[in-house]
Amino acid sequence: MTLNIEILDEKKNPLIDRTELTVRIDHFGEGTPNRLEVKKKIAALQGSDEKLTIIKKLDTHFGASHAIGKVYIYENSKDLAYFEPFHIQVRNLEKEKRTEIYQLKKRHESYKHLFEY
């Protein structure tokens, strides 16, 4: 899948120590792209750490060949863990890790070691 990513807006949030991006992802003739693919490509474009890049939102309107997304790039892992909700942190992991985290959480066991940051 070839992704054409265009950064529409870039803001630096000094209070939270993160960069907030609004992006447009063109995916003509294909479905909405996978979050992990988008995350890798944006981290490479911005020269940031992929582990500290969070895809907050990715919306495609029905019939459209592009998606609009919100991306946050954090400077450190403490801020990411503090400001991002649990479900958003899990959503930005691989499928195997997601299922493992949810299984451990269901059994009330420790799962924080599975986050990569």
Image (tube, helix red, strand yellow):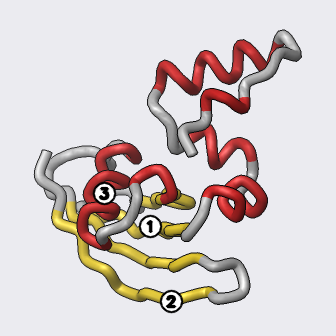
User: Which residue is under mark 1?
Assistant: 69
- Mark 1 and mark 3: span between their CA atoms? 17 Å
- Mark 3 and mark 2: span between their CA atoms? 29 Å
Decide if residue 70 is on the left or right side of residue 111.
Answer: left
Task: Quadrant for the N terminus, please.
Answer: top left
Q: Position of residue 41 (x, y in %)?
A: 26, 57
Q: Amino acid at mark 1?
A: Gly
Q: Residue at x 60, y 36 (%)?
A: 115
> Who comes first in sequence, dot 1 or dot 3?
3
SS for tag 3? loop
Q: Single out the mark in the foreground, 1 or 2.
A: 2
Q: Residue at x 61, y 16 (%)?
A: 100
- Pointer 2: residues within 10 angstroms few (<14), some, or many (20+)? few
> Who comes first in sequence, dot 1 or dot 2?
2
Q: Up-down: is 93 above or below 49? A: above
SS for tag 1? strand
> Who comes first in sequence, dot 3 or dot 2?
2
- Please state which of residues 107 and 63 is positioned toward the viewer in this rendering: 107
In the picture, residue 101 is in which quadrant? top right
Q: Residue furthest top?
A: 107
